[in-house]
């Protein structure tokens, strides 16, 4: 994680490099951020200077990840600010709706061009049975996140649930804000914008929680997610037929943990960094593998996206299909989750992944009443044994769906599951523990901590908060040192970095 800096290489180090993005788990970010934080605190009492400094660092941060596509980000901020303004100043309903439609076309048009053009070209090529070369389109990182964030503002102004800001500067900070621009959470303008005007107040508890979240985030991302990916998961999934069913099954469990630790670890660091800047962002995860149903899972996983889809897609669709009652709700769910899959990326596996979740939630809705009657008949409703069984079933459904999420070639999913079913070889489990004790230990520790009671988590946070500032610094330094020992030589980009 630490790097040797030669003065002549500093310009190259600070310039955009597609293969070396500025992410939270890199040493360059830590150096730049702590330097920025020092200056930020010195000017925190001067509102205009503080905001300008934050905007400047945010633009640089995005430039280091996306290069000249930073221009798309700036255009997005300007376009959505003015459409929000025009919508708010227009009393005529038809004109307001027209402005909303144009804003949607511009936002989704830009997103669609970069994200789905080659996918559509490939579909036409398959249908016509012709070879069509894909276009050389580089996907700007974070475009799905900042597009949805900007649309949140436009929708809320349109529905009169948010008074628009009169400051392009403040709105730009909302869109550019570096901690959550690449991977979320997709925060609401109604919560973020008022915080800009407030002079940062960072309490002892905030510093303690920030320290805890940054530490936990580094452990999740670098120590657990990156290590088990590069040393086990990628090896097995790269050629599943070479490995037994036990190893394939453990790779499925490992990937399920990896995607959680990777994404939630980055979000932990995002929230912790924001706390040090005086901003509070929404939580994006709430122990998702403790879910007792698919619906419960989506109340716990990627919460900001779930709420976005609920408020701006599912509810309007539900209203449109209200005459169809139950089947209208089921149809709205299917459409919402197929779009959720496509939001992640262009690929049939993402469409199938979204459709799977839509189907599972629709099916659960369809059998809800008879299922409840059956549970009441057996007198097991809301009992701990039932919730335990529901948690186990839900977890495995989620794990299987993540397998589809990962594998662009559905045939590979079939190979993996075939190995699990037909070539299990249970005796290999003991050999796996003996030969790969670190991998097994990290997977086991990851799941133990995930299923740990929330009260223990809160007590650990209190202990970290109680440490003096020097103690917190030593703790962070220790965790960074541990992360260095596990860090791969190659940069492993966050999984959601590509969405």
Image (cartoon, rainbow, N blue to C red):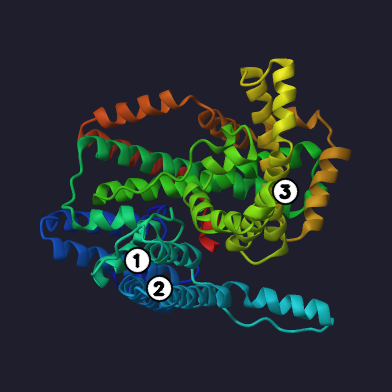
172 left or right of 373 in image: left
Q: Which residue was labeled with disc 2?
A: 73
Q: Residue furthest top?
A: 379
Q: Which residue was labeled with disc 3?
A: 359
Q: Which residue was labeled with disc 1?
A: 176
Residue lying at 20% horizontally and 39% vertically, measured from the top left: 203
Count residues near mark 1 (Cα–Cα under 10 Å), then give few for <14, some for 14-19, many for 20+: many
| Marks 3 & 2, CB-CB < 8 Å contact | no
Q: Could you say which is closer to the camera, residue 248 or residue 144?
A: 144
Q: CA distance from mark 3 to mark 1?
A: 36 Å
Q: Could you say which is closer to the camera, residue 364 or residue 192?
A: 364
Residue 74 appearing in the image: yes
Residue lying at 58% horizontally and 38% vertically, measured from the top left: 296
Residue lying at 71% horizontally and 54% vertically, measured from the top left: 355
Q: Is residue 59 depicted above or below 481 in this figure?
A: below
Q: Quadrant of residue 260?
A: top right
| Marks 2 & 1, CB-CB < 8 Å contact | yes
Screen quadrant of the C terminus: bottom right
């Amino acid at each position: 994680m630490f790097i040797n800096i030669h003065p002549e290489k500093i310009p190259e180090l600070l310039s955009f490099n597609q293969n070396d993005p500025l992410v939270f788990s890199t040493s360059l970010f830590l150096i730049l951020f702590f330097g920025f934080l020092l200056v930020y605190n010195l000017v925190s009492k001067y509102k205009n200077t503080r905001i300008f400094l934050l905007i400047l660092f945010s633009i640089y941060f995005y430039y280091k990840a996306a290069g000249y596509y930073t221009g798309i980000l700036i255009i997005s901020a300007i376009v959505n600010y003015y459409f929000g303004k025009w919508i708010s100043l227009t009393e005529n309903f038809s004109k307001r709706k027209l402005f909303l439609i144009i804003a949607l076309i511009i936002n989704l048009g830009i997103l669609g061009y970069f994200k789905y053009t080659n996918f559509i070209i490939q579909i036409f090529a398959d249908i016509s049975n012709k070879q069509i070369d894909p276009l050389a389109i580089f996907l700007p990182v974070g475009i799905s996140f900042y597009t949805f964030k900007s649309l949140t503002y436009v929708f809320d102004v349109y529905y009169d649930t948010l008074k628009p800001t009169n400051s392009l500067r403040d709105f730009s900070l909302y869109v550019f804000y570096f901690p959550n621009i690449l991977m979320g959470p997709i925060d609401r303008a109604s919560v973020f914008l008022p915080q800009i005007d407030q002079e940062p107040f960072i309490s002892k508890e905030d510093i303690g929680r920030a320290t805890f979240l940054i530490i936990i985030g580094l452990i999740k991302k670098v120590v657990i997610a990156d290590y088990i990916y590069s040393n086990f998961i990628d090896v097995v999934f790269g050629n599943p037929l070479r490995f037994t069913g036990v190893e394939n099954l453990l790779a499925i469990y490992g990937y399920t943990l990896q995607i959680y630790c990777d994404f939630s670890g980055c979000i932990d660091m995002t929230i912790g960094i924001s706390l040090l800047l005086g901003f509070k962002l929404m939580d994006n995860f709430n122990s998702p593998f403790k879910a007792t149903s698919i619906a419960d899972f989506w109340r716990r996983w990627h919460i900001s996206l779930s709420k976005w889809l609920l408020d701006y897609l599912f509810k309007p669709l539900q209203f449109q299909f209200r005459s169809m009652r139950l089947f209208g709700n089921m149809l709205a769910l299917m459409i919402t989750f197929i779009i959720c899959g496509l939001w992640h990326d262009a690929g049939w596996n993402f469409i199938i992944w979204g459709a799977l979740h839509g189907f599972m939630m629709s099916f659960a809705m369809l059998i809800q009443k008879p299922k409840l009657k059956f549970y009441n008949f057996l007198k097991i409703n809301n009992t701990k044994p039932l919730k335990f069984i529901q948690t186990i079933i839900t977890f495995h459904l989620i794990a299987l769906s993540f397998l589809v999420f990962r594998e662009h070639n559905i045939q590979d999913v079939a190979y993996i599951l075939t190995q699990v079913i037909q070539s299990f070889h249970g005796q290999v489990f003991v050999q796996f523990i003996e030969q790969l004790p670190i991998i097994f230990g990290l997977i086991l520790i990851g799941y133990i901590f995930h299923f740990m009671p929330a009260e223990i988590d809160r007590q650990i946070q209190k202990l970290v908060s109680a440490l003096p500032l020097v103690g917190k610094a030593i703790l962070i330094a220790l965790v960074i040192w541990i992360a260095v020992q596990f860090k791969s030589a190659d940069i492993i980009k966050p999984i959601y970095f590509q969405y």
